[in-house]
Amino acid sequence: MTDANGQFSLANAFTCPSSATPVYLVVTGGNPGLASGTNNKSLAMMGLLGTCGSLNSSSYFIINEITTVAAVWSLAPFMVDYAHIGTSSSNVPGLLNAFATAENLVAIETGTTPGPAPSIATVPNAAIKSLGNILAGCINSNGSTSSTASCGKLFSAATPVGGTAPGDTIAAALDIARNPGHNAGALYNSVPSNGPFQPTLAIAPSDWTLAIQYVSPAFKTPSDLAIDSQGNAWVLSSTGSNSSSVSILNVGGISATFPQTGASLGRIALDPYDDPWLTNPLASNVVELNSSGSRATLNPFSGAGIQGPGPIAFDGSGNVWIANSGPSVSELSANGAALSVNGFKTNGIGSTALALDTSGNAWVADGANNDIAVLSPAGALIPGSPYTGAGINGPFAIAIDSVGGAWIANRTGSSLSRLTSFGDSVAGSPYYGAGLNAPIDLAIDGLGNVWLANSGSNSVSEFLSTGRPQSGASGYGSASLSNPFRVALDRSGNLWVANLGMPVAGSGLITQIVGVAAPVVTPLSVAIQSNALNQRP
């Protein structure tokens, strides 16, 4: 119990299971400052204190509405409710990274936003404060859930379609975080003008996603990004005429940048050891770096029929597959040896996208032919392919789901197609809505939901694994994106977006949409190798 001023002490109240154990604190009930004897049973707030070993007798914390927002949005992929938060033993990095993200949003030591985010990061302070005020209207009340009371209005607006009403303010925050486009305007209209957190958003948002923007010259004209086993985002960018750079970005900022002079690199993929492999379309070769940014031995790799290479991916054996500018795909071994002589033919016109399934088959999208060719592990066309059904129209990106089927982003058709593992059209395909507007890239999360970057608007779209549109007519993230180009998911459920727009001259933009998706096994090569595509780590 706190004292009359809401202060508390946890001295000698707990022991650490280990120094690395993450700790969070929940505050429920009590009198929010009303008449004596008032108890608000709807009141619930929380804050993430950090790892247990970092806590000592001088540690000081403030738990309030915006620490609640930071905690819930960051931990939404790990929460059932405030009493049940956690992950598997194989995803400790994902959980700890989520704690670090929350601290960037709101400093638990002061209860203010932003937290100690890196200098290149812009935190959505006004959105966080607006959400804090939405919760404050209920918290600073007697907790009545009648239709005209503050808590009743909040709980009604936060209730997801087909779901049950939340019973406290943390549960309401979790419903909003998981359904950020639902009743966004109604929730905004409930913000009191004299709320405790100022300044707030000037107009209603199209959704309540929270996104951190990272702006740096290192990201100028980003061409691709990939996520490693620790949740770092590897960003490949063009820094000038015939020069590129590879940067490692995480919640602490840029940890390293590796200039690649004399090479105009196009796409990136990480092998099972987190080493980046990059395609060089002008020189028709592939470059491998180690985790320290140095060139691996005996590379760049050429041969194997590599010609104007574009998308690159790994199979379960660690072999590298490269889609060429023409109608062929090349294969290299894990040490760069050629495994295809002149490339494997797709019987098409070109290759716009490439994805590997867990059986070692290569799925290749042909944007000119509007079809999908599938090559066996030996490089032969699977009988019946190329596939042309499911409403495929200008395919520009492809991803494989956990049952071996393919999802295809149709840039020309502004739609999403789905094929079974046998190449048959799934009923209902193609799918529309969710703000789709010339989608150019896609990724699938740990629940099988599909996330797409829209090149025709500043947004991303979400579809459930059933094909049902989840995001609204405007998609998500319009306030934080600028010509989104590539998307990738991490072990914390964050969606990372590489943007072609330049908010600052000479600099590029990478956006981290916080906790909006389900965590996935990373890098993608490990997910394929361990038969864990689109599964939680």
Image (cartoon, rainbow, N blue to C red):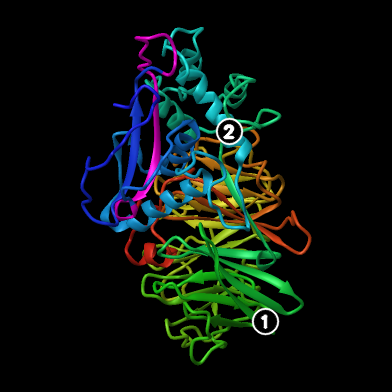
Residue type, numbered disc 2: Lys
- In the rendered image, residue 459 lying in the magenta stretch gets the answer no
Indicate the quadrant where residue 505 lies: bottom right
The residue type indicated by label 1 comes to Ala
Who's the residue at 23% across and 55% down the image? 18
Q: Is residue 364 left or right of residue 28?
A: right
Q: Is residue 94 left or right of residue 514?
A: left
- Gap in Å between the C-alphas at discs 1 and 2? 45 Å
From the top left corner, tell me how far across and down residue 409 is, in percent: 59, 51
Q: Which residue does the image show at 71% across and 30% down from the upper left?
A: 202
Residue 499 location, quadrant: bottom right
Q: Is residue 21 left or right of residue 65?
A: left
Q: Is residue 181 above or below residue 23?
A: above
Relative to residue 105, is residue 176 depicted above or below? above
Q: Quadrant of the N terminus?
A: top left
Q: Which stretch did the figure color magenta?
A: 32-54
Choose between 133 and 418: the one closer to the eye. Answer: 133
Looking at the image, which residue is at 51% across and 53% down?
443
Circle 2 sits in a helix, a strand or a loop, which is it?
helix
Q: Position of residue 535 (x, y in %)?
A: 36, 52
Q: Earlier in the sequence, mark 1 or mark 2?
A: 2
Q: Is residue 403 shown to the viewer in this render?
A: no
Give the residue at x 40% y 49%. 446
Label 2: which residue? 129
Q: Which residue is mark 1?
A: 263
Query: Is 53 in the magenta?
Result: yes
Q: Secondary structure at mark 1?
A: loop
Foreground pick, 400 / 245: 245
- Report x, y in % for residue 315: 41, 70
Q: x and y percent of residue 272 in the render?
A: 39, 72
Choose top left, top right, bottom left or bottom right for residue 134.
top right
Q: Is residue 188 above or below residue 475?
A: above
